[in-house]
Image (spheres, rainbow, N blue to C red):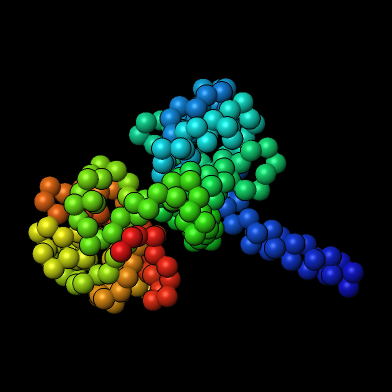
Amino acid sequence: MTRLLHLIVACLLVARSTALANPCQFESQDEGRVAAIVDARSVRLDDGREIRLSGIEPTAATKQALASLLSGRDVTLRSADDTPDRYGRQGALVFVGGSDTPVQATLLARGDAMVSAEIADKDCAASLMASEAAARRQKMGSWADPSAIKNAESPDDILAEIGRFTVVEGKVLSVRQAGATTYLNFGRNWTRGFAVTISKRTLPAFEGAGISLKSLENRRIRVRGWVEGSTGPRIEVRLVGQVELLGANEPTGVRP
């Protein structure tokens, strides 16, 4: 009996260690062989299924990187939900052969993609963010460009990115609520300056993460999302993962 208990404990420890080392090991959603690279974030399998790589937003180098990593390769698809999107694509983390590392993490570590913040699992999301952070620190891939991260104090530069997924860093000067929307203002001119908008329906997610929006006032943050706006640039935050707090001594990616 003692030997059996020891064996059970050992198996549990190994399983826990594997889960910690590979936090994106969701349930397998089948396998296949990549027949074509459809675009910078989608591939087609030899059975005709189109797969969208979850968790990332592409850069200029993503499509070419995908071709080198996935063309003709056997892959395993993992995700918490295999429901197709409105375009019929199945979202998944993609693993080549018997690898424990998703292709998304490889792309992020090379600076060939950006984290989209759509992965809900905290451990997996943190792992993907860590891969991107390492690439930023080493100025890999797209992060070698000094303008890859926009400065919140330069709204015209951000406005030029309308319709694109963009990363912005800066200090929140004020937090204001107007109707059902909370505004994180980075400029004193609320019309022209950069702002982050957060709808009332998103507030519970921030509260669940222990983040009070008012506490972000006078804090430096990094925010990512799609730039919109006709006067001042805006990014709508729908997911907590779109916002990162920057420590006082943490180096940023923007130029002064």
Q: What residue is shown at x 62% (from left), y 48% (from top)? A: 101
Frontmost residue, 61 versus 31? 61
For residue 65, above or below residue 120: above
For residue 176, above or below residue 32: below
Position of the C terminus, as image quadrant, is: bottom left
Q: Measured from the top left, where is residue 4 in percent x and y?
A: 86, 66
Q: Measured from the top left, where is residue 86 in percent x and y?
A: 35, 34
Residue 124 is left or right of residue 181, and the answer is: right
Q: Measured from the top left, where is residue 251 in percent x and y?
A: 42, 68
Residue 24 is left or right of residue 90, and the answer is: right
Position of the N terminus, as image quadrant, is: bottom right
Q: What residue is shown at x 55% (from left), y 26% (from top)? A: 45
Q: How many marks?
A: 0
Q: What residue is shown at x 65% (from left), y 59% (from top)? A: 21
The reply to whether residue 121 is in sight is no
Frontmost residue, 234 versus 161? 161
Q: Quadrant of residue 204?
A: bottom left
For residue 226, above or below residue 68: below
Residue 161 is left or right of residue 51, and the answer is: left
Q: What residue is shown at x 41% (from left), y 54% (from top)? A: 117
The reply to whether residue 227 is in sight is yes
Q: Measured from the top left, where is residue 147 in percent x and y?
A: 34, 51
